[in-house]
Every structure is written in structure tokens, then in C-alpha cells.
Amino acid sequence: MNRTKPISGELLRLKEEILGYALGYGLDFYDVCFEVCDYDTVNILAAQGGFPNRYPHWRFGMEYDQLSKNYAYGLSKIYEMVINTNPCYAYLLNVNNIVDQKLVMAHVYGHADFFKNNYWFHHTNKNMMDVMANHGTKIRRYMEKFGQDRVEAFIDSVLSLENLLDTNVLFEKQINEDDDDDYEGLEGGDLQDERSQALKSFMDSKLFKKGRKKNKKKEKNDKLGHGASKLPTRDIMRFIMDYAPLEEWESDIVGILREEAYYFLPQRLTKIMNEGWASYWHSKIMTQKALKSSEVIDFADQHAGVMAMSKRQINPYKIGIELFRDIEFRWDTGRFGKEFEDCKDMVEKNRWDKELNLGKEKIFEVRKSHNDITFIDQYFTQDFCERQSLFTYRFNPRTGRNEINSVEFAKIKEKLLAQLTNFGSPVIEIETSNYGNRGEILLRHVHQGVDLDMGLGADTMRNIFALWKRPVNLSTHYDGNETVYVFDGNELKSR
């Protein structure tokens, strides 16, 4: 797609200016390549996750249509997009005014610093731009060979599993770590090198036949059932790829979609932190360095729009930036630790200031190691909650409106953490692939206080059946009692 072009002229000068400010504040990032494009191109890129070359699928078209309508009706607007690669690619909208472009550039450098330094992104493939293009090429070839409708229908089934992931996989050196021996000799055996990672992805199709034969041998010799030594597992896509009775091209596509799902996983795990960190730095750079006096009103208007809180859901930009500011203030003044917590004199507590000036060091430390759940769990305090006027709500069927349910700190924090745990999706694991000694999969819902929506659960079971080719069972709890559902290819029923 050649619909973007490198920045030049005034935009290039602004980039060098903002870059100097970002480096001066101690941000550390890979090179950032800014490109400018029109809004239609931004919509295309956003629909495809920011990558210009993806495999063809109807969901990208649906997302593009939704984004285009939102822009046409004035419901939303995309100001920027930045990709977690090395170098980072960032896209600027050509109709933005100068203040917006400066704000966006400062915001992008915040994201780039987070991508490089946050530990949850440590093992993501920084050469994903080429890898995505390779994936698109492979899937297009499969569509030419086996038919677009057949391949697209198979992709539909696999995509229903892309939220059933195991975060522990992010800490493996490679997602397909067991197959590393197949790549010895490539680039001197150094799979950490970004070029070899892209080559590894490209070579998957050539080495896949060997891997499938190896897995079939494992299955045959496993007396306990398909891949029993790998169970239980939450990495459902990996298990299906290795042990389901799929054709080679089907298993290859599962591997492709799994690799992409795990690439995007850290962004889902750190949405509040990532946006909060970028917003913190665009605010600091703009207000302390980059703004001219004539631009203050325009900046304030745009920044206020980004920070506006919805009555129905949290704004990750707002919560993130305010938490980082709160942490910086607390560590600058010494408002942490046993001495501060044990102080019962509220007047003294409100005046507390040990002049430690550890705030900047602390927020960089937090940025490095936390994800959204640990970030909220450790730094979301009662004082912060009350200052932000947060509350929980629920739907009242009598009035037909959402109404405040609680302003209690414990309940607010509990609900917020519940929404962040597995992104609000149920935690599902494969317990056995030989349930009842019949070669059937048994899925177990790890109940965390919220009952499973069996309408959506049934759809997922149908899609797993399409891949496994055998009945799929699902165990969950309602009112403390275990219920096992089974889908046999025709209907869903409880055992």
C-alpha cells in the first residue's frame, strides 16, 4: 500500500524539535519513522492493526467501515497510530493542525519508550512489519490453492480462540520454543536477532511438514491421549495446532494467527499504562517545552477531549496519566511506606512532604515492570479513587437506566481488576483431550466470580469442534454446582 509518504518540511523540523525534548527528559526508544497520510488511509491501517500488509479477511473490511462511519458522523477521530517495531512506524493525519501534530509526536515518543522498555513487550518480534507481510503472502497462496471461502471460513473458526491465550508464553524466548532445533544454522543460530526472527517466520511453511510428522509420532506413542503431557493448558491455539487432525496448511494458519495474537497480547495487557505513559509525556513536553503562547488554547481543547471521562466506562488515558502523576507526587513527597500509612493525624498527613524527589525515578521503574493489573492493584489507592470521583454502576430495569451502584473503594477496585483480568473474557483451559476415553476435549472454565455466558460459549465450542473433529465438552459452575456441556456437532446439551 503506497498511500503514505515520509514527513518533510515543517513536520520534519517539528519532529527534530520534539525528539530533542523527549531525549532530554530521559526517554529511550528505537528510531521513529513518521509518515503522513489521509484519513481513509488511517482507517485502513487502523482496521488492520496498524500494518499495511495483512492477510485478506472480511473482519478488516467491517472494522474499516465502522471507523469510516464514525469519522463521517463526527463520533470519533484517529489522530495517530504507532507500531511496536524497530524502527517504530508512526502515522500522522495530514489534516491535523500544527499543535495537533506536535502533541501527536510527543505522544508517539511516549509509546515508543514504553514499547522498548516495558518487560511485557520484551520478547515481542520487533520485525513484525515483515512478518505480517510474510503471513499475508502465505495465506493468499493458500486461498489460491484451496479456495478463498474455505480458507476464510477456517480463519473464522481459529479467530474465535484468539482471546484464549496464556500470558506465560510471553516470557518464553520464542513462541515456538520446542522447534528451535529446526532453525539451527540460520543467522549463526542467533534467534534473538530480528532478521533471523523474520526469516524463522518465513521458513515455517518449509519446515512445517517436518514438525507435523514429529507431532503425529508423539500422538501415536502417547498412551494417555493426544498431547496429554502438555495438559492442562491455556494455550489452546498451540494445542490445536500441534494435535488436532488438521491438514498442513490448516495447522500453518493456526500458527500464523497464534503468532499474531501473542504479538498483540502485551498491548491488551498494558492499555491503561501505555496510554497513560504516552499522555503523561505529551502533556509534560507540550506544557513545559513545545507550546507557544498562541497555541495554549488549542492544546488545552485537544488534551481535554482526550482526557474526558465517560459515564459508562473508564478512560485509559485519564486513569493512566493521573496514576503516573499520583505516583510521582507521592514519591517526591515521601507519601508512601509504613511511617506515612501509620500516621493518623490527617492535618499532618495532608501537609506531608519529606522532599525526597524520587518521583521521576519511580515512574520509570513502574513503567518498566508492571502491567495494568499489577499497576492498578499496587498504586490505585483510596485517596486516588476519591479524588477521581469513581464509582460502579448497574442497570436498573425499573427505570431503564444505568445508576450508581456503589462508591465504596473496595468494590470499585475489585470491579476494575475483574474487568482487567483476562480483558473481561473467561479463563478457559483444556483439561484433557481424551475425556471419557473417547478422544473428546474437555474445556474447564476457571470460575472467578462471574458466570459463563453459554450463548458465546456454545459458539466457541462449535468452532473448536470444527478444528478437533470430535465432541467438545465444557465444565463450568453455576451457584456452586458443576455443569458439563457437550457439543457433538449437532446440538449443545448438558451431561
Image (tube, rainbow, N blue to C red):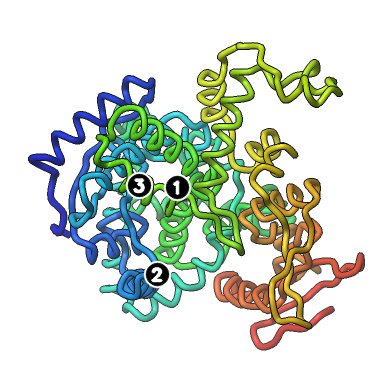
Give the number of the mark in front: 3 or 2.
2
* Numbered disc 3: secondary structure: helix
Q: Circle 1 is placed at which residue position?
A: 263
* Numbered disc 1: secondary structure: helix
**Residue 323: image location, x then y, percent:** 59, 37
Q: Dividing the picture into quarters, in which one does residue 356 lie?
A: top right
Instruction: Point out the image quarter for the C terminus.
Output: bottom right
* Label annotation for residue 75: 2
Between 269 and 253, the residue placed more toward the observer is 269
Q: What's the amino acid at mark 2?
A: Leu
Give the number of the mark in front: 3 or 1.
1
Q: Circle 3 is placed at which residue position?
A: 201
Q: Would residue 5 be found to the left or right of residue 73 on screen?
A: left
Between 397 and 134, the residue placed more toward the observer is 397
Instruction: Point out the image quarter for the N terminus.
Output: bottom left
**Residue 97: image location, x then y, percent:** 21, 50
**Residue 430: image location, x then y, percent:** 70, 58
Separation of marks 2 and 1 at Cα, in angstroms? 29 Å
Q: Would residue 127 be found to the left or right of residue 407 on screen?
A: left
Q: Earlier in the sequence, mark 3 or mark 2?
A: 2
Q: What's the amino acid at mark 1?
A: Tyr
Q: What's the amino acid at mark 3?
A: Ser
* Residue displayed at 34% across by 54% down: 205
Give the number of the mark in front: 2 or 1.
2
* Residue displayed at 72% across by 76% down: 454
* Label annotation for residue 323: none
